[in-house]
Amino acid sequence: MLIPVLTVFTAVCSALLKSLGAALALGLVLGIAGAVLAASVVSSQVSAAQGRSERLLEELPSAVLLLRGGVLVYVNRAGRDLFSISNEATGRRFADFAPALLSDAVEEAHQLRQPIDVELQQHQRLFAVRASALGADRVVLVIRDVTHVRRVDAVRRDFVVNASHELKTPVAGIQALAESLSLALRHDPARATRMVGRIEQEAARLAQLVRDLLDLARLEEPDSALRRRPVDVTDLVRRQVERLQPLADERQITIKTDLAGPGVVVAVPEDIRSIITNLLENAVRYNRHGGTVDVSLARADGRVALEVTDSGEGIPEPERERIFERFYRVDKGRSRAEGGTGLGLALVRHATERHGGTITVRSEVGVGSTFRVELPIAGQQQGP
């Protein structure tokens, strides 16, 4: 662009010298030269700013499309990927390749001269779309992928509903028992004693639910490597086995351990304790009377593997993918009777994945289940 401008400028200077003389022509030439240089600088600045804007738009995760008179004049990379088009698509009518929903939104924004918001479902994804009029015949479309946001919102709503229901049950039980207890104390002391025992059970269940909710909230917080330190998994397993031994004896359940060698991992101690506690408690509480629990710990290929096997009822195949969901229970009645909150395996999964580990389950109905957790010895923070 600069070379044609200089050519024109040279021709103008030559003509001025011939017609006005050297002195007057020099002043005019200097003025013209200043104007040309200023225009050149402004043009360069505008071009640089336009280039930066285009690069910025190309890197946006949202799709951006500019239409003039219904014809596509610009689309960024996200927009090309969304509609499976190339840069050569500019110049095509938008209605030729876009869903009718978006074409209608563009037309409505153009006619009403105000932003139009719609939602588009495409490729099993959900998109929030805004069409805004710019000037007399231009419309800009901004399309954001909100699939994950909506999914998180749905999970939060379900969690609030489920948590409220789980909290309501023991609270209502305590309230009803407390009301009856005042009468029983006067007329039936033996019944009053039984009621106190039931109140204690409901209170314990409520306290356990609150603890699990707090653990879940802690596990969903951003992890910090500063909180991690060497944790002896073998020692934690032994302690939990000793803690659960009275309950196992009461149900005549035999706990066998095979803890070969040290099993030290770099981890958040509370997370490892949560994994071991929930797996062992489930194996004892939901086992058969007179059953067995086998606990093994092995170290290989830079990982520590914990396996807990029970001789319980087993888990039907359709249920196995859902048992790690919050508040999901295979046998709802039995789980509540055992004091379960429905959060134990969700806690195990969160804690395991936060440390870069894996959890798998093998189960056969009528035979039992085996849960296997593998954790990297050196510790590994879960990626984003």
Image (tube, rainbow, N blue to C red):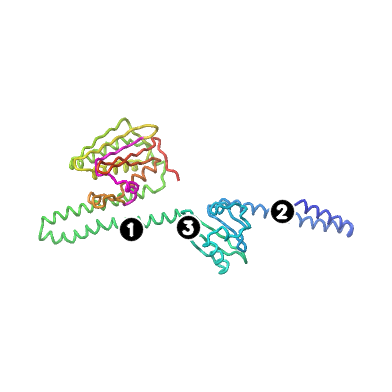
For disc 2, the marked residue is 41
**In front: label 3 or label 1:** 3
Q: Residues within 10 Å of mark 3 (few under 14, many from 20)?
A: few
Q: Residue furthest front?
A: 96
Q: Mark 3 or 1 closer to N-term?
A: 3
Which secondary structure, mark 2?
Answer: helix
Figure check: 208 above or below 183: above
Figure check: 78 above or below 233: below
Tell me where the magenta segment starts and ends, as one range.
304-327
Measured in 3D between alpha carbons, the distance from the residue under mark 2 to the one under mark 1, in whole angstroms, is 63 Å
Query: Given the image, on which type of amino acid does mark 3 rest?
Result: Gln
Query: Given the image, on which type of amino acid does mark 2 rest?
Result: Val
For disc 1, the marked residue is 161
- Percent coordinates x, y for residue 297 in the rendering: 31, 34
Query: Given the image, on which type of amino acid does mark 1 rest?
Result: Val
Q: Look at 27% across and 58% down and name the residue there.
A: 168
For disc 3, the marked residue is 121
Q: Mark 2 or 1 closer to N-term?
A: 2
Q: Residues within 10 Å of mark 2 (few under 14, many from 20)?
A: few
Q: Is residue 329 left or right of residue 101?
A: left
Measured in 3D between alpha carbons, the distance from the residue under mark 3 to the one under mark 1, in whole angstroms, is 27 Å
- Percent coordinates x, y for residue 57 in the rendering: 58, 53
